[in-house]
């Protein structure tokens, strides 16, 4: 299970990566290590802009990381920008999932024992709320807990994180298989052993956008 983590400038109500830049990210036009500049948007004239693309360089899954304690207080402008970004993802058939963080702050029982996460009515209610807001199936909402005050690794925290990562990689694989099914003729391509790259975009310190793609 090979993957690599990247990050980029965030998205807020009035600033951050815009829709065009997100499209370039999704399509793999932006090279690794590029420094975003709010005063100079990405364009086809940008130094290092990638013109000729292989399917292995495009985005295969997008992950939104949402603070579970702020679900009902997301700024309207942030929500609007997010919907526009989702429209770009949907146009490309890219699957999306949500990592719902800080679930221990949502439910006292879960805070006492994280193994209660899948039995908590409050966590379930929050998952359903996020599902409605984001327009995604509940199975695409993955609850996790942040490491915050812990001095040592915690098995329950790690298990949730690994379960979520496994699901995310499954979604990425599904996208790849669907892509190959649509382009079988004339293409000889295998993504076995490819490195999965992860892009992170912070949205108002509340939402993060992670995009997964495979790199050969």
Image (spheres, rainbow, N blue to C red):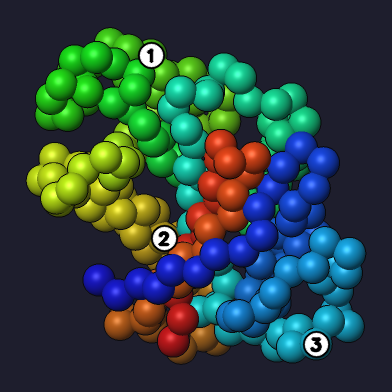
Picture quarter containing residue 4?
bottom left
Q: Can you see residue 19?
A: no
Residue carrying label 1: 125
Q: For the residues carrying marks 3 and 1, which lies nearer the camera in this image?
A: 3
| Number of the label disc, if any, that sits on residue 172 | 2
Q: Does residue 195 appear anywhere in the picture?
A: yes
The quarter holding residue 109 reads top left
Residue 106 falls left or right of residue 88: left
x and y percent of residue 57 in the render? 55, 78
Q: Secondary structure at mark 1?
A: helix
Disc 1 or 2, which lies upstream in sequence? 1
Q: Is residue 157 above or below residue 47?
A: above
User: Relative to the observer, which residue lies in front, 12 or 171?
Assistant: 12
For marks 1 and 2, give the CA distance: 27 Å
Coordinates of residue 52 in the picture (x, y in percent): 70, 88
* Mark 3–mark 1 distance (CA, rounded to whole Å): 47 Å
Helix, strand or loop at mark 2: helix
Q: Residues within 10 Å of mark 3 (few under 14, many from 20)?
A: few
In the picture, the disc for residue 47 is 3
Residue shown at 14% from the left, 50% from the top: 152
Q: Nearer the viewer, mark 3 or mark 2?
A: 3
């Amino acid at each position: 299970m090979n993957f690599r983590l990247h990050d980029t400038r965030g998205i807020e109500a009035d600033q951050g990566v815009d829709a065009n830049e997100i499209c370039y990210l999704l399509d793999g036009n932006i090279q690794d290590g590029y420094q975003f500049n709010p005063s100079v948007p990405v364009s086809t004239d940008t130094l290092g802009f990638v013109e000729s693309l292989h399917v292995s360089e495009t985005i295969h899954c997008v992950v939104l990381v949402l603070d579970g304690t702020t679900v009902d207080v997301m700024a309207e402008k942030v929500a609007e920008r997010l919907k526009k970004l989702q429209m770009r993802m949907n146009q490309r058939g890219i699957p999306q999932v949500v990592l719902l963080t800080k679930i221990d702050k949502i439910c006292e029982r879960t805070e006492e024992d994280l193994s209660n996460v899948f039995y908590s009515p409050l966590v379930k209610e929050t998952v359903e709320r996020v599902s409605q807001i984001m327009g995604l199936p509940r199975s695409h909402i993955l609850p996790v807990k942040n490491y915050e005050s812990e001095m040592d690794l915690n098995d329950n925290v790690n298990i949730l994180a690994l379960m979520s990562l496994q699901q995310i990689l499954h979604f990425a694989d599904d996208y790849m298989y669907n892509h190959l099914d649509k382009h079988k003729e004339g293409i000889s391509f295998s993504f076995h052993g490819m490195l999965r790259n992860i892009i992170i975009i912070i949205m108002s310190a509340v939402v993060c956008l992670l995009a997964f793609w495979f790199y050969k």
